[in-house]
Image: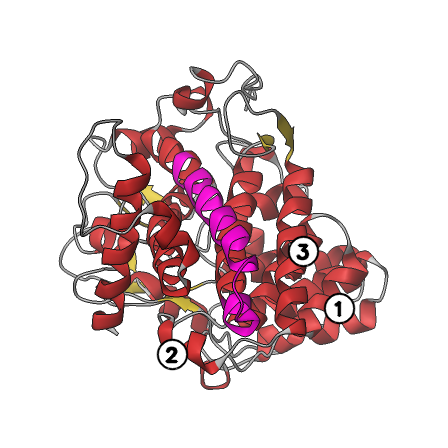
Amino acid sequence: MKKILYKYQIAFLLGVISLTSCKKDFVNPNAPTTDQVFSSARGLVGVNLGAQRTYSLGGASVVYGLTTANGFVTNEVILMNAGNVAEFQFSRGGTAVDATNTILANIWTNSNKVIYDANSVITAAEALNDKAYASGLIAHASILKALSIGSMSMLWEKVPAGIGTNVQFIDRTAGFAAAIATIDNALTKVSANPISASYSADAVPGLDYVNTLNALKARYLLFSGKYAEAITAANLVDLTKKSTFNYDAISTNPVFTTATATNNVFQVIDSTLGLPAALAPTTGDGRIAFYTSINTTVAPRYRINGFFNATTAAVPVYLPSEMTLIKAEAYARTSNLTSALTELNKVITKTAAADPFKVGAGLTASTASTATAILDEVYKNRCIELYMSGLKLEDMRRFGRATTERKRNFFPYPFKERDGNPNTPADPSF
């Protein structure tokens, strides 16, 4: 895997150098031109890899930023060192989180960069003769693009309508629609020309393309209030499969490297996982031990575990059980309470052994009988099952949770956008 990884890193970096170099008369005869990178199938694999690294690798990545921003403002995590300025802002919440926040700037900048790179790959792949190879390229790029649009749409009230100078803004609901349209295009390409074995051999392992596309579609349809369509998409996901961002000793898990290993940035709050007393995890819930560990000698007692407990720990793009909870919520919101409770109880009673990622509550089934009670249980179990996934702030708004349970509702727009784009909307008050 590392040989493949480094080979495409080199291809991508050379392509970036040729794209971003200053207008000088220096020519490297050994470096590929931009046209060569984007007309080569393997060059496009390298561009996708670079975009995935931008999204998922390092303390400036969207994965780190989304986990951190969400974790603090929804009370999943606590601050360990006030010298970490961006995290300190999140820990205080409210107006303390301002347009200087570097984590928000990283999410914004890197999401837009991923979208730009993904658009370039999708356009170039369309021109390839090998359509089965091209569908793999388009699927990979579309996953990264949809995640980036979706991440921005979860954090900001409005998102850019495109990439460019003085770009206009659209409502975040239109952002989710754009992410869904990107996914639908990719699914159409893959359906017409299934991804080839030669593409799969060249691609870096981790992502399950078709399952991930359907899972993200289900997620963003749910966020858009399109419940019947969300159920349909969720039903297309194979719940026995994994889809992950993978790490190794050199390209390390960003949350582990920055926070878990240092014990100097943030840690999990405690066994409540940040939920109020009425919704706190039940004693014996196996997910507490999955997502937290105990340190009996050095404070704090509760520590990060789960998907951020090792240098090489893989981070799921989605959890299979998210699909089950999507169906439970969608059924409950459309008054099909019997089906809602059935899906909900699949998660509540699931053991770790029965889950691909070993996330399991192992509890007695719920007997909730009203829509309100079932939705409360769905919210509770989303917060526990999907802990530190970056989805909780969106959930809190959708379930109408009191604003006193969170420290922000939406985030201010980074100065680097406002300073260069007169169309940047006004910041939200909370």
Instruction: Out of 161 and 225, give the one closest to the viewer.
Output: 161
Above/below status of 401 relative to 334: above
The amino acid beneath tag 1 is Thr
What percent of the width, then of the height, locates residue 337?
82, 67
The amino acid beneath tag 3 is Asp
**The residue stretch that appears in magenta:** 109-136
Residue that carries the numbered disc 3 in the rendered image: 376
Place residue 311 in its image quadrant: bottom left
- The first of marks 1 and 3 along the sequence is 1
* Marks 3/2: CA–CA distance: 44 Å
What percent of the width, then of the height, locates residue 148?
49, 46
Image quadrant for the N terminus? bottom left
Q: Within 10 angstroms of label 2, few (less than 14), some, or many (20 or more) residues?
A: few
Image quadrant for the C terminus? top right
Instruction: Out of 166 and 96, give the one closest to the viewer.
Output: 166
Q: Residue at x 45, y 49 (%)?
A: 274
Residue that carries the numbered disc 2 in the rendered image: 201
What percent of the width, then of the height, locates residue 129?
54, 67
